[in-house]
Amino acid sequence: MNGWAVSQLPELELRGRVAPWRRLEWLLLAVLIVFGFWLRVRGLSELGFADDELHKWMAANRYVHGDFTGDDVEHPMLMKWLIALCLKIGARFGWAPESIVRVPNVLAGTVSIWVVAQLGRRAFGKLPGLWAAGLAAFSTTFIGYQRIAKEDTLLGLFLMLLLWCCAEAKAAADDGDTRAQHRWEYLGAASLGAMLASKYFVFFTPIPVVFYLSVRRLSRWRIPVRRWLWLTAVSFVIFSIINWTPFLPSSWSYWGAYVNGKTGPVHGSLLFMGEVFHNLPPYWLAGTPAWFYVVFAAVKLSPLTVLTAIGGLVLALWQRRPAHRLILSWMGVWFLLLSISGSKWGRFFSSVLPAFLLLSGYFSAQLFAWWSSRRISASPSRSVAGAVGARSPAVLVLALVTLALWGGEAQASLRYAPHYRLYINWLGGGDRNVDWFFPHCDYFDAGFRESVAYVAAHAEPNAELSTEIDWLARYYAEQFGRSDLTYTLVRQGESCRQGRTCYVIVQAGRLYFLNREAVNNLERLTPWHVESIRGHPAAKVYRLSAGESPFPDESLASTRASPEAR
C-alpha cells in the first residue's frame, strides 16, 4: 500500500494550517455554490405544503405578530424565526407561501456546500474537499431534503460547523497556538448551541466528545474541566437567546399534550419496504427496522457515490488517523443512536449524508493518487490549480474522475427536479420501487394540494373531505374557495359518518395501522380522481355517497365515475 500517497498527507493528522484555496479553486467552489443554489431554489413552490410545513407557516405568521405560542411548540424556534423573516421580505415581492417557508433551508443548504468544502479540505485536503463539495451541490437526495421546511437541514449545517471547529481546535493545539485553539473551541460551542436551537437532538452532543477522546492520546489537545464548563455555558447562552420558548410554562403543558398524542393526529407507524412498522421512539428495535438508514444510503445516492463512500469508510476503519476518527465519530454516534430508536424518517439522514460525500471524495482522491504514483514519475500535486496546469495525462484523468463522480448525481438532479426525493438508484431497482422503499418521506404530501384543488372544483356543497392531514385539507380547500366543506380523519367511526357525500384522499406512503383497513377496502374501487407524479399515483381520491364508509364495516357502492367521464 505504499502507493497510496494521499494517505500520507498531513491533513489526515489534523495538524498545521490548511493550504489556502487558490484563485481557480475559489472560482470552482463559487460555481458549485451557484449551481447548488439554483438546483435547490428552482420550482420551489411547484410542490404544495406538506402537513409539517403548514404548521411552520402558521407559527411564522404568529411570530410576525409577536405570538410565540400555539402549535408546533415541540420544535425549536430558529427555523420559525427565519421563516418569519422571509415572510416579512417575501410579502413585498409576492412570494408564494410554499416558497417562503422553504427559503431558509435552501439558503442553509447552499451554505452547507461551502462547509463541506472547508471540512473536507481540513480533514483530507483540497481535492477531496472540492469533490465532496461538488457532490453536496448536485446530490439529488441532499437537495430534495434541503428543500422542505423541516429542522434537519439547519441541524446538519451546525453539526458540520461544530465538527469543523473541533478539527481546527485539534490542529491549533498540536501547533501550540493556544489562542486559535480556544477561539475554535468557543466557535464550536456556539455551533452546538445553534444546533440544539435548530432541533432537539440532544443525543448528538456526544459526537464532539467521542472525537476528542478518540484523539486525546494522539495529540496535545487538552480541554480542562473549567473550560468544559465555560464551553457548556456558551452553548446554553446561544441556545437560550435563539430558543427561549422551552422556558415558558405554556410550552410545558403543550409538550405534555403532544407526548400523549392530544395535539393532533399521531399516526405512530411508517410504511417502509412495503410493510407498515411502529414508528415511535419507545419501540426501539421493535419499531422501524434498524437497517432503515443503511438501506437509505444504499439506494438514495448515485451508485458511484455509494461505492466510493464504502471504499472511503473501509480506509477510515483500517487506518483510523485523526481525520478518519472525526468522520467515524460522526457516523458511529449517529447510526448507533438513530438506528436503535424505534422512530426513523428519511429527512434525518440529511445530517449524516455529508459524511458519505466526504468519504467518497477522499477515496476518489486516494484512487487518483495511487494512479498518479504508478503512471507519473512526479509526485501528485496537492493543488487543483497545479494539477490543471500540468501538461500530463493526469489532467485528463482528473477531469474524467470529476465528471464521473459529479455526473451521476447531477444528471439525477436534473432529471428528477422538482421531485428530487423520488430518486432511487439502480441498486435499489430505480423508479419501480419509489412507492416501496420510503414513500411517506419521499412524497412528503406531494400531490395533496392538487387533489384538494380537484375536489374543491367538483365537490357538492357541504361535502365531507376525509384525509390523514385535516389541517392541510382545510387550508387548501379554503384557499380554493371552499369554506363549506367539513373535514375528518380516516378513522373508524369518524370518516364519512356525517350523512353527506364524502371524498376520501389516500396518499402514497400514508398507510398506517389506523387506516390500513380503509385503504385496503378502497383499493377495490376505481378512484374518482388520481393525482400522478412521474407516472406514480401520489394521491387517489374516492367519492362515497352519503352513508357509505371507507371501512369494511359497511359495504361500499360500485365504482363511481369521475367528472371527466360524465
Image (cartoon, grey):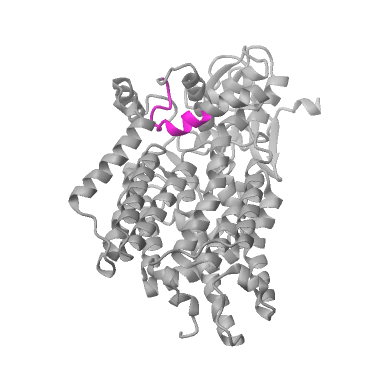
Between 135 and 240, the residue placed more toward the observer is: 240
Q: x, y percentage for residue 92? A: 64, 22
Name the side, left or right, on which 96 lies relative to 2.
right
Judge whether residue 491 is colored magenta. Answer: no
Name the side, left or right, on which 225 lies relative to 296.
left
Q: x, y percentage for residue 261? A: 37, 28
| Residue shown at the point (66%, 56%) measured from the top left | 410
| Residue shown at the point (40%, 20%) measured from the top left | 69
Count up the numbered dots. 0
| Residue shown at the point (53%, 36%) measured from the top left | 149
302 w.r.t. 162: above or below: below
Tell me if I can see residue 285 in this picture: no
Quadrant for the C terminus in the image? top right
Q: x, y percentage for residue 413? A: 66, 52
Q: What residue range appears in magenta?
A: 70-83
Name the side, left or right, on which 216 lies relative to 276.
left
Write down the quadrant of residue 148 in the picture.
Answer: top right
Among all residues in the image, which is located at the extreme left?
Answer: 225
24 w.r.t. 253: above or below: below
Between 163 and 420, the residue placed more toward the observer is: 163
Tell me if I can see residue 234 in this picture: yes
377 w.r.t. 134: above or below: below
Between 301 and 103, the residue placed more toward the observer is: 103
Q: x, y percentage for residue 94? A: 67, 24
Write down the quadrant of residue 373 in the picture.
Answer: bottom right
